[in-house]
Amino acid sequence: NAGVTQTPKFQVLKTGQSMTLQCAQDMNHEYMSWYRQDPGMGLRLIHYSVGAGITDQGEVPNGYNVSRSTTEDFPLRLLSAAPSQTSVYFCASSYSLLYLQGGELFFGEGSRLTVL
Amino acid sequence: AQSVSQHNHHVILSEAASLELGCNYSYGGTVNLFWYVQYPGQHLQLLLKYFSGDPLVKGIKGFEAEFIKSKFSFNLRKPSVQWSDTAEYFCAVNALSNLFFGTGTRLTVIP
């Protein structure tokens, strides 16, 4: 098992550009989510999904889109990048909400995004 | 507003010193509480968790945490830190079908 795989690991964008951060898991996890990690602010939940075809907003969803067409993939789209979106992005997954309640959340290695 | 607060942003200790990191949450009702650790260059890992029962829970690597319901707190402790404990520590709460994290505390242990 590869676990949770994120690509790219590093990306530099110009303001206004769009891009997609990819996230894939091979553990047949129902729950997937995206967090952003910023200094002094910890991890903040952007969007999450409890299964294919189901997505919902987290704490800081503005400027981001997600979709969940398959169980394995949960891409995060930046529609028009802004400097405020400079951050480290983590994808995370869990077998189910029940497992999530138990803290069983598996993280990817992160994607560092810089918006100039 | 519902939140998870960690008041210590950066803690610097010498090896063998005792550690206590504070965590307070403001979610109502029954919550599950966690501490995660992020070692340099790595992703987050679960350190310990509390669901119910004994409010003193033990985790990996000698860490423990105490849940005090009346104070909405879940402080992390370790009697004697090691250089290898240098990392960032995040308190988290399971509420509203998600995990919400605190702002993190960076621990630096000096050999």
Image (cartoon, coloured by chain):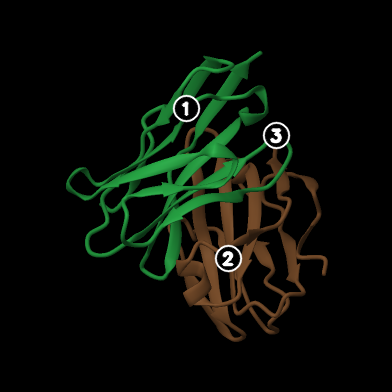
Chain colours: A brown, B green
Q: Position of residue A9 (x, y in %)?
A: 80, 49
Circle 1 residue? B79
Q: Is residue B73 left or right of residue A7?
A: left
Circle 2 residue? A33
Please, what is the three-letter code of the amino acid marked with disc 1?
Pro
Q: Nearer the viewer, residue A19 or A89?
A: A89
- Residue at x 50% of width, y 17% of height: B17
User: Which quarter of the rendering shows the N terminus of chain A?
Assistant: bottom right
- Residue at x 32% of width, y 54% of height: B54
- Residue at x 70% of width, y 34% of height: B40
- Marks 2 and 3, how far apart at CA: 22 Å
Whether labels 2 and 1 share one chain: no
Circle 3 residue? B40
Chain name for mark 2: A
Q: Is residue A80 among the parts visible in the rendering?
A: no
Q: Secondary structure at mark 1?
A: loop
Q: Position of residue A100 (x, y in %)?
A: 51, 68
